[in-house]
Structure formats: C-alpha cells, structure tokens
Amino acid sequence: MTTLTFGTRLVVASHNPGKVWEIKELIAPFGLDAVSAGDLGLAEPEETETTFEGNATLKAVAAAKASGLPSLADDSGIEVHALDGAPGVYSADWAMPGKDFGRAMQRVHDELAERGAWSGPAPTANFISVLCLAWPTGETRLFRGRVDGTLVWPPRGGNGFGFDPMFVPEGATETFGEMEPAGKYAISHRTRAFAAFKRDCLEGIAAEPARPKSGRDLEGLEAAARNLSTQAELARFIASLRDDLATNGADWPVRDLTSFLGALQQAAEKVDTPDAEPRWRTLARALLAASR
Ligand SMILES: O=c1[nH]c(=O)c2ncn([C@@H]3O[C@H](COP(=O)(O)OP(=O)(O)OP(=O)(O)O)[C@@H](O)[C@H]3O)c2[nH]1
Ligand SMILES: [Mg+2]
C-alpha cells in the first residue's frame, strides 16, 4: 500500500473553506504539506453519487488525477431522523442557490414543523463525515465518522459552518455553532473519521504539536466570511475582524478608508440575482477584502 510520509504534499479536495480549514487543522501536526483544491485551481466536480462514500471517492479521485498528488476528500452531511435521514447526502443542495445555510436550516425547521416534530422531545439527528484518501494511481481508502445529537430552534452561535448552529452534540448543552473550535473538533464526525484515517495512514508519522499561529489567520476569516448563515454571525465576524485588527494591525494594509469604501461600493453595485449570495455574506467579504 502506498504510504504518506512527513512532508508529503496532500491535496485537500474540497471547495468548502470551512471544511478545508478544519481538515488542515487536523493534518497540521503530522507535517503533511496540505494544499486545497481551490488553491490549485482544480474544478469542483459534480457530486453525482447517492452515498457519502461514493461522493467522497469521486472528489478525491478527481483531485488526485488532476494534480498528480495524493488527495483527501470529505463528503458529509446531517441526517435528521424524523425526516427519514434527509437532507443527508444532499445537505449542501438544501443550501442552494447561494450556499445559504440560513435557508437550509429554515427548511429543516419547516419540514420538522410540518411533521409536528418540534412539539415533543428535541428532534434527533447525526452528522456523518466520510473521508477518502486517493492516489493518482486510482488507489483509494475510506474512513467514516459520526456524531449524534439533537436539534434546536432558533439556531445559536456564529462558529463552525453549515448546520452547526442548530446541532447540539450528545452530552453538550451548546450547539456546534456556540462551541469554541476546539470543542467541536474534540468530538466532531470529521475528527472521528480523521482518527480512523490517522490510525491507518499516519501511524508512521511522528505527530508534532501544531506550531502556534503567528500573524493573521486569513484562511480562518475567509472561511467564516464564506459560511455566514445569519445576521448574528455577521456581528460575530465583525468582532473577529476587530480582534484581528487589535492583535495584528501592523499586517493590515489598510491605512485609510479608500479600499474599505471601494469594497463596499463593489458590494453595493452587485445586482441581486436568484443565485446571489446573501447580503450579510457579501458585506462580510467586503469587510475582509478591505482588510487585506
Ligand atoms: O453544520 C455543519 N457542520 C459540519 O461539520 C458539517 N459537515 C458537513 N456539513 C454540511 O453538509 C454538506 C456537505 O456537503 P459536501 O460534502 O458536498 O461539502 P461541500 O459541498 O460543502 O464542499 P466539498 O467538500 O464538496 O467541496 C455541507 O453543505 C455542509 O454544510 C456540515 N454542516
Ligand atoms: Mg460538495
């Protein structure tokens, strides 16, 4: 079997910045040189399979073949038990158009309401993550992780991404959206799938403590900006930017309001189409653009 070794360049075959950020955090201690599919300009493949395993394989193989590098893809989703497992493998589709998870969460809420599922004990659900490691030769390995929990309404918290603000993992009182990232990573479906991947593929690599971050975490901010679902999350995002300015102000290129106003103008001139991203996310991206 082909193996991963310290320093191996690995493509994180995802176009979801929240996921890419989480996977890079998990990989960081193992000295792999992780680069995302987006950074390499790889196309986002159409997810035509009907299982998490099928789509994870499709994404990993496409990236490995296109880049000539080993590649790690994640296919994941939330399964709501009173909705017979929906949206499941179609979780991302429920946020279309515009990857609007405010709307996706609203749909989960509404479909549960139609079935009267909010009137008794909290509705139960689970997240699934399937990781696929693929080699340019076509060799693949699959790993699955799951976390169970209950749903709350309205959504709470601005951390994480996707459906995190309405999911409370078993044994917790906070939603994934309210937890600090370390709290989610300790128990998440992705971490559990990663643990299986680690046992199989990273056994030989001595884990190093992750290097403390210095400077701006632009990838983290970008991920947050791309995954805003609610106005409360925008407020939280602005607070993160203000913290970043206070800590890393010397790295901010902005010395006057010109680029800030330019970015806002661009956002304001954007014509709304059915596919347009929600206004709060546009605003977050304008603010971030002005800060770099
Ligand atoms: O609240 C969440 N917390 C999570 O930890 C999580 N993991 C997955 N999901 C949702 O399930 C869909 C996966 O779809 P998915 O696997 O096709 O990913 P994606 O299309 O976003 O990116 P890519 O990796 O395919 O490029 C996405 O829409 C996610 O929002 C999550 N939601
Ligand atoms: Mg996808």
Image: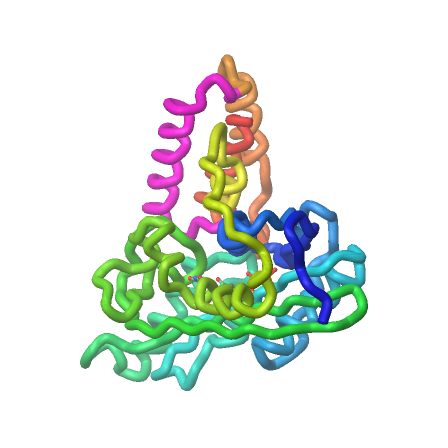
- Residue visible at 51% across and 26% down? 291
Q: Residue at x 56, y 63 (%)?
A: 203
Residue 283 seen in the figure? no
* Residue 162 in the image: above or below residue 159: below
- How far from the left and from the top, in percent, is residue 88? 48, 76
Check the image and report above or below for 68 versus 47: above
The outermost residue toward the left is: 120
Work out which quarter of the rendered image holds the N terminus and state it.
Answer: bottom right
Q: Which of 248 and 49 is in front in this view?
A: 248
Left or right side of 158 for 161: right
Specify whether residue 6 is painted magenta: no
On screen, residue 95 versus residue 3, left or right, reads left
- Can residue 163 be seen here? The reply is yes
Name the main secondary structure of what is drawn in magenta. Answer: helix
What stretch of residues is rendered in magenta?
A: 226-252
Residue nearest the observer in this picture, 286 or 206: 206
Instruction: Please tell me which residue lies in front, 101 or 40.
Output: 40
